[in-house]
Image: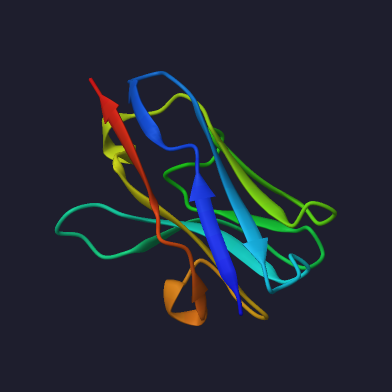
């Protein structure tokens, strides 16, 4: 059974930093894994994805501020978020599948989410 568990969310002021973690079980992290977010009243959107070869893709809105990485030995996906803005406020989800991109519809496995709130 695949299980993805996010942690590390919280409340910070604009300009601050947070580090999100996603612990994976029942699936190797040697697949496409990504972070997605959903703000109230908005559709879920892709934030950052890392492929099986380690290649990364970022949404334009987070380029230069967020860094995605995965530790295959620990089956963990990370997201370092710096220079946070109020518009980054959302529920952040970890997802995994054997193929993927920033399109959340391509992912079969999801965590329960962790809330990130950035105040101005």
The image quarter in which residue 85 lies: top left
What count of labels does the image hold? 0
From the image, which quarter does the C terminus lie in?
top left
Q: Residue furthest left?
A: 41
Image coordinates for residue 111, horizontal then vertical, percent: 47, 63
Image coordinates for residue 106, horizontal then vertical, percent: 50, 80
* Colour option used: rainbow
Residue nearest the viewer, comparing 99 with 114: 114
Q: Is the residue 90 above or below the residue 31 in the image?
A: above
From the image, which quarter does the N terminus lie in?
bottom right
Q: Is the residue 67 above or below the residue 109 in the image?
A: above
Q: Which residue sits at x=40%, y=28%?
A: 84
Q: In the drawing, does residue 63 fall left or right of residue 46?
A: right
Image coordinates for residue 109, horizontal then vertical, percent: 52, 75
Residue nearest the viewer, comparing 117 with 106: 117
Residue nearest the viewer, comparing 102 with 11: 11
Q: Is the residue 30 above or below the residue 41 in the image?
A: below
Q: In the drawing, does residue 4 fall left or right of residue 52?
A: left
Q: Which residue sits at x=75%, y=58%?
A: 55
Q: Which residue sits at x=20%, y=60%?
A: 42
Q: Which residue sits at x=68%, y=73%?
A: 26
Q: In the drawing, does residue 52 fall left or right of residue 49?
A: right
Image coordinates for residue 23, horizontal then vertical, percent: 63, 54
Q: Residue furthest right?
A: 73
Residue nearest the viewer, comparing 75 with 85: 75
């Amino acid at each position: 059974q695949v299980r993805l568990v996010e942690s590390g969310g919280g409340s910070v002021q604009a300009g601050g930093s947070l580090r999100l973690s996603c612990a994976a079980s029942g699936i190797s992290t040697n697949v496409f894994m990504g972070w997605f977010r959903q703000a109230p009243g908005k559709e879920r959107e892709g934030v950052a994805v890392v492929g099986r070869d380690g290649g990364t893709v970022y949404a334009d809105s987070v380029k230069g501020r967020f860094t995605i990485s995965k530790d295959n030995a620990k089956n963990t996906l990370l997201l370092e978020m710096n220079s946070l803005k109020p518009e980054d406020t959302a529920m952040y989800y970890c997802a995994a599948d054997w193929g993927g991109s920033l399109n959340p519809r391509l992912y079969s496995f999801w965590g329960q989410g962790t809330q990130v709130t950035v105040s101005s």
